[in-house]
Image (spheres, grey):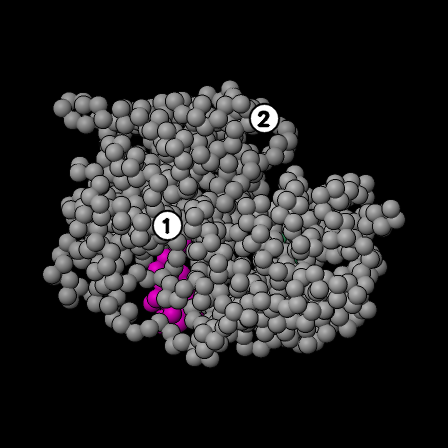
Amino acid sequence: MKTSVIGFPRIGADRELKKASEAFFAGKATAEQLDAAARAIRAEAWRLQKEAGISLIPSGDFSFYDNMLDVAFALGAVPERYRALSLPPLETYFAMARGYQGPAGDVRALPMKKWFNTNYHYIVPELSDDTALKFDIAKWQDEYEEAKELGVETVPAVIGPYTFLRLARFTGSRTAADFADAAGAAFADFVHDMRLATDAARFSFAEPALVLDTSEDDLALLRRVYAPVLRAAHRTVGGERFARVALQTYFGDLRDSWSVVSKMGFDAIGMDFVEGRERNLALLADGSFPDDAELIAGVVCGKNIWRTNYLKTANELISQIVRHVPAERVALSPSCSLLHVPWTVESETKLPRDVLKWMAFAVEKLDEVRDLAYMHTGLNGVLGYDPWDANVKLFYNDRVEPDAEVRAAVAALAEGDFERVPAFAERERVQRARLALPKFPTTTIGSFPQTKDVRAARAALGRGEMSAADYESFVRGKIERCIRKQEEIGLDVLVHGEYERNDMVEYFGDNLDGFVFTEKAWVQSYGTRCVKPPIVWGDIRRKAPITVKWSAFAQSLTKKPVKGMLTGPVTILNWSFPREDLSLREQTLQIALAIRAEVLDLEKAGIGIVQIDEAALREKLPLRREDWRREYLDWAIPAFRLVHSGVKPETQIHTHMCYSEFNDIIRDIDAMDADVITFEASRADLKILDALKAAEFRTEVGPGVYDIHSPRVPSVDEIVAAVRKMMTKVDPAKLWINPDCGLKTRGEPETEASLRNLVAAARILRGE
Ligand code: GLN
Ligand code: ZN
């Protein structure tokens, strides 16, 4: 049985690419030095894959920033404003990725969007009516040759034309369909040119967009873009097929495109049997897998960091696959690009062996794919094969002892635990009487600028150079200063500033039982930005109150209400690596119970307003609309309600989201049953407000009145105008005035100036 890899992380084992790119951006390294760093990373990735015995190793999966951008750039889809800078190619590429400000001009970056249901972000290609698509294969040719020189035969891999067009943005009157023939011809040239320029004869086209909801029009687009590609590949030259084309899908199943995909004549089809397991197996079961094609079967999870259970995978999954496609035609692979997991477990020096032995990052997953293929081939001979024995032994026992109390608490949850009483309208009345806030109450989202001294103090505490007592008094000093400043500015609902937090998820993970943290398990989020997600290891329990002392201290300093600040359970889970031995629902409920205890303790300590951030609620919405409710919202929304359902009617619950694209789940957002929700609206065109109105949204709202992602200070007039616009759509009595997200990344001077203008705007509006 063969093995295949879709893509390998390109940031490097120690984030070498990040470091080299940042040096290049800062003018401290040359393009040659950056290129050398990239070569070293690629060489290492190929070496590891070859050493692991992978049969189909990709090339071209590397990227200086993003693979969608690579394709756009290679196709010549470079908008005129970037061309006009007349920069060298690599710098033009980076200008599209990051924007450019310098002697050649001033342009903003292309927008970025989340890549399917991952935490990775891609650059959205922009096509205007006069964009001509023509494929320049240089990147793929170079990387193929580079691997070959290192003795590694590779399969050039590229994001395919269908996904490219479905995710692109069209600025003129031409649509994806209008570009279909041009894109098809360009990708046909890719096959043709690569085949002649190199000795590669097999190519892989990634089409993850096939796991999205797919309409008849989409299927027509798919047929049109691939007809020329397959025609170019399937010519007979010298009695042989000119080239072979693999269609690689991932992140889900092909439920609504299979009837077309299976008949198009691809030489290989890659399917995801982890995220798309049930439906993709069902598609094979009806015998429709093409007789002459190869199946690349994703059987090792490419998105999570746990070891694969060999016995289970072999007996319950691979055995089913080979019942429908003979093993000689099957290649095993990870379920998606390994880009979404860290490089290697070997870099971790602090976690105990007993924990690490359960983890598999990119390098380890190569071995897993190889072992599974090897085991299948030599099925009767695997006894005594060490990795197999070790794996079977590993899964022989449960990973961790369940926390009986936590399990019982989750099991005992009853419907009433998810319902807050009294109903919203009654609470609104009680809270208005208690809080006596002015019209258009002003507030912030929680964090204040994390200035150098804050980060330095935390680092010193971490290194043991600052005592816990000194750190504590340092943070208290910051809080006091922050409260005084907010009072002076004249805000109505104050915050303590979140100085004690490194990150809104990590901070809670750190203070809850059940999480573990790594040192170098970085995953690319976009470009040079990497994240190191906490890992859910065991059952989650709150050891002791987490935020209460900070909030209570802040409240003791002022007569104005201070909001308690918490991160919600869905966001904590969505920004972590979850367990695989317990359902997501159950893990979320465990976290919800922990945060619920914190909410109740805050209330007891005299905190009258508690904000529970759900910055990432939308992120794990399933890719198919028909799965939204059953697979996600049906438990995610109740989990949020569980967090706050125990508070008194007079305690006001806020929530915050970092985006405003929730038109399509607006009723679910209202069903979170918070009293106030703040969200990002300043960059969007306020379309969300129409949707709020149409849905008769009852939760009070604070659509951000200015963009905190830029240091720009909004003027009073601008804020007044923004709020006036909002007032035409939202009942003014329900309107809050606040920035669109936390102020953590901002500097103090612009923060203070912006908030002063915000308060001045509220005062003007109240006078009307
Ligand atoms: N309360 C958090 C803060 O202000 C919210 C951050 C976020 O939504 N990303 O930093
Ligand atoms: Zn936010």
Answer with left or right where residue 745 lies relative to residue 554.
Answer: left
Mark 2–mark 1 distance (CA, rounded to whole Å) = 34 Å
- What residue is disc 2 on? 81
> Residue 342 magenta-drawn?
yes
* Mark 1 neighbour density, 10 Å: few (under 14) some (14–19) many (20 or more): many
- Residue type at tag 1: Leu
Q: Quadrant of residue 437?
A: bottom right
Q: Position of residue 81 (x, y in %)?
A: 58, 26
Seen as rendered, the residue at the extreme right is: 767
67 or 248: nearer the eye? 248
Answer with left or right where residue 110 lies relative to residue 239.
Answer: right
- Residue type at tag 2: Arg
Q: Does residue 39 appear in this view?
A: no
- What residue is disc 1 on? 338
Count of marks placed on residues: 2
Ligand 2 under 8 Å from disc 2 Cβ: no
192 or 438: nearer the eye? 438
Magenta span: predominant SS is: loop
Badge 2 marks a residue whose secondary structure is helix
Q: Which residue appears at 49% of the width and 65% of the height?
A: 588
Q: Which residues are magenta?
A: 341-361
Answer with left or right where residue 729 lies relative to residue 90.
Answer: right
Seen as rendered, the residue at the extreme left is: 380
25 or 704: nearer the eye? 704
Q: Which residue appears at 88% of the width and 49% of the height?
A: 767
